[in-house]
Amino acid sequence: MGENGGYAGAVIAAGGMAQRMQGIDKQGLCIGGIPVLVRSILAMDALEQIREIVVVARPEMFAQIEGWRQQYQLPPFVLTAGGATRQQSVLAGVEKLSDKVEYVAIHDGARPFADKALVERCLQAAIEHGAATAAVRTKDTIKVAAPDGSIAQTPDRSTLYLTQTPQIFSLELYRRAAAQAQQEGLDFTDDCQLVEHIGQKVWLSEGSYQNIKITTPEDVAVARAIAGEKEETKMEIRAGHGYDVHRLTRGRKLILGGVDIPWELGLLGHSDADVLVHAVMDALLGAAAMGDIGKHFPDTDPAYAGADSIALLRHVVALLKKEGYRIVNIDATVIAQRPKLKDYIPQMCANIAAACEITQGQVNVKATTEEKLGFTGSGEGMSAHSVCILQR
């Protein structure tokens, strides 16, 4: 047992859908070269009294989190699925703690900058009073709004605090409060409120203005600035290359870069056979070490028969955003003897840029022949190369 007493367990809530992050996976977002959730796990492990850690996450995150366990040599922790709400998810984590645990520290997975001293202050307050939360005074004057949008009142700022996590409770107290809420059919979004509901006071412990929760994309810039104050921020740059080839045949449309080009021949393939977009997708997936289009859109799956490749590109971009990647630029070359593609290239660039959610200035498409050499020169088929840069 630690020198200050109290055998504690931590429950890290990381199962939210991140609806305000515009598709960015905030738990996997690298801040200073380290994923947000990894930072939160290490923050809880820093305190001697915290002997057990439970991470509550969505099942689709399990493989990624298990990879971090090895990559960052994380302390032992239990990984479990959450429920439909925060209260249900935290309770699912609490149920994984052993009977040795006296105090439970509930922490947001997206709050990566809780330092050791902050957590220790909060734990000692919980040991003394039974319930405590990290909190900071509000810096701004708060207004209470009337139904018509006017100011109804101005509370005394000296009494107002912004609560943070960890929020720490005696385990017996938390379980009693959770059981009462379940019995009454109540569901609280704040763990302190759950405990307050049964008449238990929760004490305020000094938090930190750097102990931010990453909730919106704007918070990412703040988090990077905080990490930069503590260590050299490592910006990850990834390059990818993609190549694809399709045979030319009669009776098929010729679609390149999402543009339907009138010609007597088209490209043969399971989808719309857009050789240019396929090369772009492979470059993006390759840069992120996420396989290739055959892995994600197999030609044995009837769901992708005749599929619009631009739509598939949008799906690839969503996968990249989930991993925290941003597309810096795309450069691609179509290799074809005929037809002449110059007049269609601006629309190809526009289509690819729109699907990738970047500007047209970040996309370059070129076309060339091989001077009648090889299968493209003989008109048997077309090929395309693409390179890209990703950043996170």
Image (cartoon, helix red, strand yellow):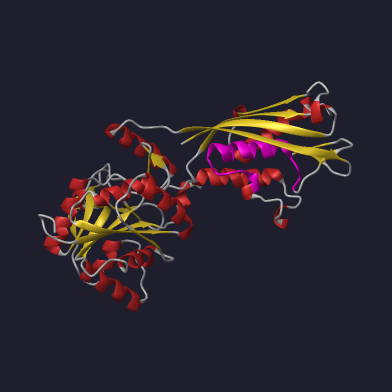
Tell me which residue sits at (80%, 39%) in the image: 247
Query: Which residue lies most toward the top here?
Result: 371
Tell me which residue sits at (35%, 44%) in the image: 72
Query: Which residue lies most toward the front here?
Result: 374
Q: Is residue 245 above or below residue 197?
A: above
Tell me which residue sits at (44%, 66%) in the image: 84
Is residue 284 located in the magenta-colored stretch of the structure?
yes
Q: Is residue 359 above or below residue 306?
A: above
Whether residue 329 sits left or right of residue 301 in the image: it is: left
Foreground pick, 66 / 192: 66
In the picture, residue 277 is in which quadrant?
top right
Whether residue 204 sits left or right of residue 392 in the image: it is: left
Magenta stretch, main secondary structure, is helix
Please provide percent x and percent y for residue 231. Answer: 29, 33
Please provide percent x and percent y for residue 28. Answer: 43, 46
Q: Is residue 257 visible?
A: no
Query: Which residue lies most toward the left here?
Result: 3
In the picture, residue 248 is in which quadrant?
top right
* Stretch of the chain drawn in magenta: 271-294
Foreground pick, 186 / 157: 186
Q: Is residue 366 above or below residue 24?
A: above
Is residue 341 located in the magenta-colored stretch of the structure?
no
Q: Is residue 189 visible?
A: yes
Please provide percent x and percent y for residue 168. Answer: 22, 60
In the picture, residue 344 is in which quadrant?
top right
Please provide percent x and percent y for residue 8. Answer: 21, 60
Query: Which residue lies most toward the bottom here?
Result: 183
Quadrant of the snapshot with the N terminus = bottom left
Whether residue 348 sits left or right of residue 389 in the image: it is: right
